């Protein structure tokens, strides 16, 4: 469940300087600046409105800009609420997550290419099948010009779910060996049919 909505925050308060037209007190009216923002899980994502309210320190009357007398409304224009960096913290978090995901993907592609060039028995390949599903195959034998694999008995719908096979069906491989020429494996890698290679360190 995703919790989202809007919230408001008080960002600045000015010293009372104006006179109150309601109670007649002198130098008792100041301004509050508010910012409303959209949030996800209470983390501010972006602000969407700013509002100035007058307040009387004596009678506690609060007026919106539309309700203020003309002279007070003119003063309110100079009290524009200031945005804070934390109002955009959600955007910063999203950018950081995307950057991390991009770095992780780049690292995995580089690692996969490295493992392909220097294979070891026990390497686990994540591959895309002709039916669009994904499965694992474990490298079981290395020949000069080909590699022999045993196929996992299970498939998943997405490459992101291959970790489920590694975690829950790590020993469910066929006994039969299937050999692929090394040049064919290079083609499958370039065409994204080999999506990952994992190696126990």
Image (tube, rainbow, N blue to C red):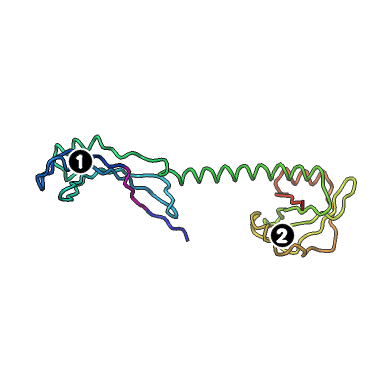
Q: In the image shown, does 97 or 119 lie closer to the viewer?
A: 97
Residue 8 inside the magenta-drawn segment: yes
Residue 3 inside the magenta-drawn segment: no
Name the secondary structure under disc 1.
loop
Comes first in the chain, label 1 or label 2 = 1
Q: In the image shown, does 48 or 22 lie closer to the viewer?
A: 22
Report the residue that reaches farthest toward the left. 24
Q: Which residue is mark 1?
A: 16
Seen at 54% across and 43% down, the residue is 96
Where residue 139 sits in the image (x, y, percent)? 82, 54
Q: Which residue is mark 2?
A: 166
Seen at 64% across and 59% down, the residue is 157
Q: In the image shown, does 183 or 53 lie closer to the viewer?
A: 53
Where residue 201 sits in the image (x, y, percent)? 77, 51
Query: Tag count in the figure?
Result: 2
Name the secondary structure under disc 2.
helix
Q: Is residue 105 above or below residue 4?
A: above
Splitting the image into 4 quarters, where does residue 136 fall?
Answer: bottom right
Where residue 61 sits in the image (x, y, percent)? 17, 50
Where residue 37 sits in the image (x, y, percent)? 37, 48
Please give left or right for residue 164 compared with residue 25 in the image.
right
The boundaries of the magenta stretch are 6-11
Which dot, 1 or 2, sits closer to the camera?
A: 1
Please give left or right for residue 15 compared with residue 157 in the image.
left
């Amino acid at each position: 469940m995703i919790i989202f909505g809007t919230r408001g925050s008080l960002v600045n308060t000015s010293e009372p300087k104006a006179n109150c037209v309601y109670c007649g007190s002198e130098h008792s009216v100041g301004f509050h600046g508010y910012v409303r923002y959209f949030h996800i899980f209470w983390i501010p994502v972006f602000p969407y409105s700013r509002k100035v309210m007058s307040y009387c320190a004596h009678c506690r009357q609060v007026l919106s800009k539309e309700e203020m007398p003309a002279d007070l409304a003119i003063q309110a224009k100079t009290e524009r609420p200031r945005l804070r960096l934390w109002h955009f913290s959600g955007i910063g978090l999203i950018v950081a997550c995307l950057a991390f995901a991009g770095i992780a993907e780049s690292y995995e592609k580089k690692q996969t290419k490295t493992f392909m060039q220097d294979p070891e028995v026990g390497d686990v390949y994540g591959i895309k099948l002709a039916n669009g599903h994904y499965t694992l195959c474990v490298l079981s034998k290395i020949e000069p010009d080909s590699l022999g694999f045993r196929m996992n008995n299970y498939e998943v719908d997405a490459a992101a779910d291959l970790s489920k096979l590694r975690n829950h069906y790590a020993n469910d491989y066929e006994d039969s060996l299937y050999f692929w020429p090394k040049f064919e494996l290079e083609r499958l890698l370039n065409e994204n049919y080999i999506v990952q290679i994992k190696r126990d360190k």
